[in-house]
Image (cartoon, rainbow, N blue to C red):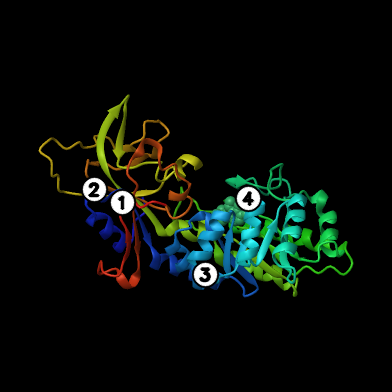
Amino acid sequence: MTIPAAVVRDRVLSLPSGELPAYVYDLAALREHAANVRAALPARVEVHYAAKANPEPEILAALGPYVDGYEVASGGELAHVAKAVPGRPLAFGGPGKTPAEITAALELGVERFHVESEYELHMLAELARQVGPDSRVAVLLRFNLPVASGSLAASSLAMGGRPTPFGLDPSEADTVVRLLTDGTYPHLELRGVHAHLASGLRAPEQLAVAESIVRWAVGLVERHDGVRLAEVNVGGGMTVDYAAPEDRFDWVAYGEGLAELVSRYPDLTLRIEPGRALTAYCGWYATEVLDVRQSHGEEFAVVRGGTHHMRTPATKGHDQPCTVLAVEDWPHPWPRPVARRELVTLTGQLCTPKDVLARNVPTPGLKAGDRVAFALAGAYAWNISHHDFLMHPRPGFHFLDEVDTESVAGEKERGQGFAH
Ligand SMILES: Cc1ncc(COP(=O)(O)O)c(C=O)c1O
């Protein structure tokens, strides 16, 4: 079980049934976590938050003081993030950029383009010439790099080191570096290399990957006279362990390793772009038990909501960590369902056996009406879910902030049915 902070627990217990399910974000906890992450990293490592993990404007703003910018991966994210955190540096990535998206990014003055193919380079060069004939656009070339055999084996999602559509093939590297440095594309400026190879790696594996990316990038520019490597972005993918939520990514060890790495390359700026490991912990998906029932020797508790709101356990195939908050009141005249077994599987309201939030949760005595707070729901949760399936109401959204915790006044809330 994962225990919510008092402020989160009180909110979950105080919401009327009709206002559940709800996402509850602990912004004070997010700030504290982000500050610790920043403090663990050396000065020459810049942090760009990968907005795809959770683009809620309140989350983007809360992270503001602790990040150097934001990574966006679509025209939609670009417009949204530019509006939510105006004036902050944006890096524009993504495997399939359209001419319209690139033009919008150029007009918005995006500070880095992560170019993923030679075709995209040609397109960006021409659009950059049209949009800003007197300026130059900074480019990182994204590569799908080879990695030492087995080094991504522990990852939950490998986007590189094997055939994927993400980034340039290393065999194209010399051609694209030449195009960027021989005067062919005067509106583009090669700043360096980008590689996001996998998600779900622990600090030692992340460091090994970062080191191999930097070495490869240094080797690449050494083959080209007069070309300087200013920046290497080693991506995100710091692990979040859903089976052991207390066991967090070791940012201190990672920071120490990166400090050692940058000390070997005095002119190089490193960038990382974490998503999940920054925001997962601050979010809770809170709901209530609707019914408890037996089936073929197992017990199931059906909760309000489900994976159409929080798809994370379905996509990643894990049990979402949770805590049960017992509720004594039972307002109905009919009998209250109570669990008879030690272990109960928590499912949602969808008509599919895939709508499982957590299997075999030890919750003896679980009753209908009890509240359940699912932890680690602050990343790849609401925004990756199939909200409209079965047309259940949308959850509420609550952004709790330290200063406001004692009073409802001043707190940013969104009611049920808020359209995203
Ligand atoms: C290019 C890129 N950067 C950063 C991230 C963030 O990864 P994570 O949320 O695992 O840190 C992703 C995730 O897919 C990505 O594709």
The picture quadrant where one finds residue 231 is: bottom right
Mark 4 belongs to which amino acid?
Ala
Asked if disc 1 and disc 3 are in contact, CB closer than 8 Å, the reply is no
Dot 2 crowding, Cα within 10 Å, few <14, some 14–19, many 20+: few
Gap in angstroms between the C-alphas marked 3 and 4: 30 Å
Gap in angstroms between the C-alphas marked 3 and 2: 35 Å
Asked if disc 1 and disc 2 are in contact, CB closer than 8 Å, the reply is yes
Residue of label 3? 86
Residue of label 2? 18
Please name which of the two marks, 3 or 4, marks the residue nearer to the observer. 3
Mark 1 belongs to which amino acid?
Gln
Asked if disc 4 and disc 2 are in contact, CB closer than 8 Å, the reply is no
Q: Is residue 123 visible?
A: yes
Q: Determine whether the residue tagged by mark 4 lies in a helix, strand or loop.
A: strand
Q: Is residue 413 left or right of residue 186?
A: left
Q: Earlier in the sequence, mark 4 or mark 2?
A: 2
Q: Is residue 201 visible?
A: no
Q: Earlier in the sequence, mark 3 or mark 2?
A: 2
Q: Earlier in the sequence, mark 1 or mark 4?
A: 4
Dot 1 crowding, Cα within 10 Å, few <14, some 14–19, many 20+: some
Asked if disc 1 and disc 4 are in contact, CB closer than 8 Å, the reply is no
Residue of label 4? 198
Please name which of the two marks, 1 or 2, marks the residue nearer to the observer. 1
